[in-house]
Amino acid sequence: MRADCIDILQELEYWYARGNGQYLMQVTRAATQPLLDTAFGYHILQLGVRGGEPLCQESPIHHRLYCASSVVNGVDLVAESDELPLESDSVDAVIVHHCLEFAANPHKVLREIQRVLIPQGQLLIIGFNPYSLLGCKARLRGLLRDPLWSRHRPVSERRLTDWLRLLGCEVLDTRRLYALPPLGSGRLHRALTAGDTWIARHNLPMGGIYILHATKQVVGLHKPRRLLLARRRRLIGLVPKPAAAPRSGFGRDSRPSSDGSHSA
């Protein structure tokens, strides 16, 4: 996600701001809220789509960071997703909203996210399901050279689960939403909305997007020592460092005299 990523994120924000994108953002917020309520700690980080207001704003964790690759309103941290300027094992929860599927190297992005996540930290990954009506529409628009969907490289649930296992993460649950886009108006719109709600309630695999909930089970993967030393000055420590232990009242050369007093 380099220079062209800025345009992609802007196009995604525009897509979510109109038509059925608003409905999709509403159902996504409703589905992620119970998962966010189970994440506790000091720091939560969100990457990718903002959708007006980041999903991390609804988290009970007080220190919330929204990261993007450009300076826009509401961004707390400007950085690339595959080079986060955060210390390893420093973030309690991470939300990845359509970030992997538009990245040049999604596995590298996932490794970087796993590095900054603390052991037992919570991870929410939201992506488009390629095996759905929405996935087929995106693939067709990509073939027609749409500026957004032509750069879309979907990551399936199975592939993402395999990557997470390799990185020592355990998948706890997967929710699937937006199987039937609520098109039209009146009776047709109500029928499609009711059908989409029923499919989402039963978590059928035909949903247009998936929300994968995972947790980190092992210590983060360490890069070579030389690379860590080179990046140390650029890393942001989110966890407060413990205060230095108080020094003893005796100096190094202090020693008790024979009458009980001390001489320097």
Image: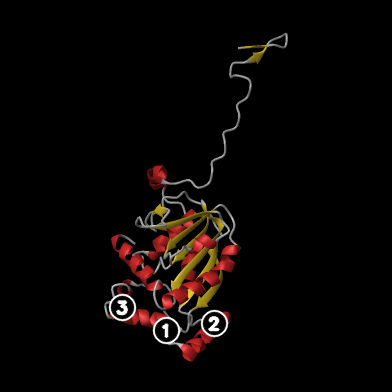
Determine which of the numbered discs, if any, sits on residue 133 in the image: 1
| Dot label at residue 226 | none
Residue 178 visible:
yes
Quarter assignment of residue 145? bottom left
Compare marks 1 and 2 and give the one earlier in the sequence.
1
Q: Amino acid at mark 3?
A: Gly
- Mark 1 or mark 3, earlier in chain: 1
Q: Residue at x 62, y 15 (%)?
A: 254
Q: Position of residue 224 (x, y in %)?
A: 41, 49
- Indicate the quadrant where residue 49 lies: bottom left
Q: Nearer the viewer, residue 82 or 61?
A: 61
> Camera-side residue: 144 or 170?
144
Q: CA distance from mark 3 to mark 2?
A: 28 Å
- Per the model, the C-alpha gap separating discs 1 and 3 is 14 Å
- Amino acid type for the residue under numbered disc 2: Thr
Q: Provide residue 218's location: percent of width, then percent of height.
A: 54, 57
Dots 1, 3 in contact, CB < 8 A: no
- Residue depicted at x 40% and y 71%: 17
Residue name at image x 59 percent, y 68 percent: 34
Residue 197, disc: 2
Reading the image, the residue beneath label 3 is: 142
Outermost residue toward the left? 145
Element carrying mark 3: helix
Quadrant of the image containing the C terminus: top right
Q: Quadrant of the N terminus?
A: bottom left
For the residues carrying marks 3 and 2, which lies nearer the camera in this image? Answer: 2
Question: Is residue 168 at all visible to an observer of this figure?
Answer: no
